[in-house]
Image (cartoon, coloured by chain):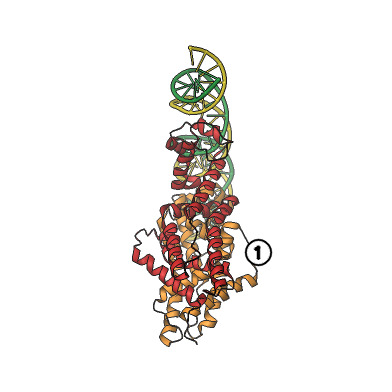
Chain colours: A red, B orange, C green, D yellow
Amino acid sequence: MAHTTLGIKKGRKFDQVIAGARTVFLRDGYEGASVDDIAREAGVSKATLYSYFPDKRVLFLEIAALETRRQADAQEDRLDITDPPEVVLPAAGRKIIDFILSDFGIAVFRIAVAESARFPEIGQKFYDSGPGLLRERLSQYLASCSAQGVLNIDDPELAAEQFAELCKVHLFPARLFLGRTDVDEAERNRIIDSAVALFLARYGTRS
Amino acid sequence: MAHTTLGIKKGRKFDQVIAGARTVFLRDGYEGASVDDIAREAGVSKATLYSYFPDKRVLFLEIAALETRRQADAQEDRLDITDPPEVVLPAAGRKIIDFILSDFGIAVFRIAVAESARFPEIGQKFYDSGPGLLRERLSQYLASCSAQGVLNIDDPELAAEQFAELCKVHLFPARLFLGRTDVDEAERNRIIDSAVALFLARYGTRS
DNA sequence: TAAAATCTAAACAGATCAGTTTAGATTTCG
DNA sequence: CGAAATCTAAACTGATCTGTTTAGATTTTA
């Protein structure tokens, strides 16, 4: 149906190719994925695939771009500027944790780390639509709190990055390196609560 | 000279093989490295290489083990329990930043992230001798401070991870995804100072 | 020095993979 | 319908890679 790139590409099965490539690249990474696998997964002949994309690298870049944009959109709903930090921060932290612990978030992160040495534009896109976007939105909120006197922050961008980083504590490395998938609610909340407390102890204006 | 594994392996050029494999794996990753490249880099024939290691995978695991142990040793000098947090934390933060921004630190991290999905023992070893070791040592120090009343920490292990995470803020993603290599003293210090201030605002006992 | 251990270059087998080509089938649409 | 666009399976090229083998050279050691 709606082609993912603006009109330039043609053909009935374009979306199938994209979907198949997405599945296989996310599962196996760039080197691990074979074009035959992708064609099979997409239910499409290799010739068709190659009629859309000149080579594997370009196909991968297309998927990476789509995925990072998706990642950005999934977090689209902005932070409500009217709510106080005690409400907004735990909610934001929860979203961050849920995303970075998901199979999808982990797969994208793995590929971004592994391939950004070979393909700098992958690292750039991942950063812009992931950590970079989060930083932008969160720092905007923090700055407005600071202007209202609800928080006291001299460098909102740095503070935003600090908060995001605090949410990853313990759980992200455990998932990434130790394969831990059994992270329950209580543990997520413990990390978030501690991050919020740490953050507000420094940047809060309440006694 | 001193063989890296305990006596089981034999042969004059063992160390050359290790050195060559180290260079090539760190430069190109697991998939990117070819055994011919490694043999050439090591100045050794492929037959010799295969007389030491049954296959590429085992060779890689050996290198990964050596590298993570190295990583641990490089940070061997423990934290001086007698110094106050205002001295110890900036010094520790400085070490963390310097390591994770180094070419070597980045290369090891890239490989650990990329290969720990395929080789779980790589993720385990990296964690144990990297983030895990840091956590252990730092939390020990924090606990002793807490016992002395210099700090007020209920969960030293969590606090240790929080501090370490705070030191990575901004600089690590910029290096990893954006390829930024021009991080000067001032910027490192800015991150560290902010991390220490944030940490002490919550866990400090002064005023 | 002479046997034993270790190493060498180079060719080779077997597998995988990216990308192309062919000859034809199916779909779309005027 | 019928022509143009799109897709198909399958074979093929050429490259790369892991791991083995061969026949001999070099080094160690006794």
Which one is nearer the viewer's eye here, B18 or A109? A109
- The percent position of residue B144, horizontal first and vertical second, equals 42, 83
Question: Where is residue B38 drawn, in percent x and y?
Answer: 55, 51
Chain letter for the residue marked with disc 1 in the picture = B
- Front-lying residue, A139 or A106: A139
User: Can residue B10 be seen in the rendering of this structure?
Assistant: no
Residue at which label 1 appears: B182
In the rendered image, the vertical position of residue D6 relative to residue D18, given as above or below: above
Drawn side of residue A90 relative to residue A161, left or right: left
- Residue at image x 59%, y 50%? A121
Q: Tell me if residue D19 comes above or below residue B68 in the rendering.
A: above
Residue type at tag 1: Asp
Q: Secondary structure at mark 1?
A: loop
Determine whether B57 is above or below A206 in the image: above
Residue C3 x %, y %? 46, 51
Seen in the picture, residue B199 relative to A173 is either above or below; the reply is: below
In front of the other: B61 or A22: A22
Total number of numbered labels? 1
Q: Depth check: give the residue in front, A48 or A10.
A: A10
Horizontal relation, residue A186 to residue B72: left or right? left
Classify mark 1: residues with Cα within 10 Å, few (<14), some (14-19) or many (20+): few
Q: Determine if residue A7 is in view.
A: yes
